[in-house]
Amino acid sequence: MQIKDLKPNKRNPRKISQKKLEMLKKSIEKFGDLSGFVFNRRTKQLVSGHQRTKTIPQDATIKIEKKHDKPTSAFTIAEGYVLIGEERFKYREVDAPEEWEMEAMIAANKHGGEWD
C-alpha cells in the first residue's frame, strides 16, 4: 500500500489552505514528524508532547526501537514509542540546537488547518 491508496474522508472537518499546506510541507521537511512525543537529548527538554505527558500515567514506558548512527536531516537520533496499556504512541529523540527546538515548538502548534 502507498499513500496514494489512502482515500481522504469527505467528512473530515479540517480543511487547509494552499499556503498553510506549503508551510506544513516545509515544516515536515525541516523538523520531521512533531506528533507524539519528541525529546531533545541535547537540551534534555520536550519539543512536542507537552500536553500529552499531562494525560498519561507518569510511569508509562518508553521503548527505543531504532537508533541512528548519525542524526537525520531532522536531527532524529532515536525512534520508538511510549507504551500506555496495549497502545503505542510515537516517540522520537533528536539532538538539535536550541534555536531549532524553539522553531519546532512553534511549528508544532502553528501549521494546522482550519475547522469546517
Image (cartoon, grey):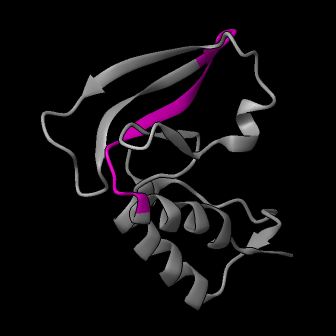
92 relative position to 72: left or right: right
Q: What is the quadrant of the C terminus in the image?
A: bottom right
Q: What is the quadrant of the N terminus in the image?
A: top left
75 relative position to 16: left or right: left
Q: Is residue 87 magenta?
A: yes
Asked where in the image residue 31 lies, by quadrant, the reply is: bottom left
Give the residue drawn at x 79%, y 31%: 54
Give the residue drawn at x 31%, y 56%: 74
Where is residue 17? Give x, y as percent: 65, 86
Residue farthest toward the left in the current orientation of the protein: 69
Where is residue 80? Give x, y as percent: 42, 25
Q: Which residue occupies the foreground of this view, 101 or 52?
A: 101
Q: Main secondary structure of the magenta part?
A: strand
Give the residue drawn at x 48%, y 83%: 22
| Image vertical order of residue 7 relative to residue 27, above or below | above
The span picked out in magenta is 83-98
Residue farthest toward the right in the current orientation of the protein: 116
| Image vertical order of residue 9 relative to residue 18, above or below | above
Q: Which residue occupies the foreground of this view, 27 or 43?
A: 43
| Image vertical order of residue 68 relative to residue 87, above or below | below
Asked where in the image residue 111 lies, by quadrant, the reply is: bottom right
Where is residue 55? Give x, y as percent: 81, 29
18 relative position to 56: left or right: left
3 relative position to 78: left or right: right
Give the residue drawn at x 51%, y 63%: 102
Where is residue 101? Give x, y as percent: 46, 58
The mark total stands at 0
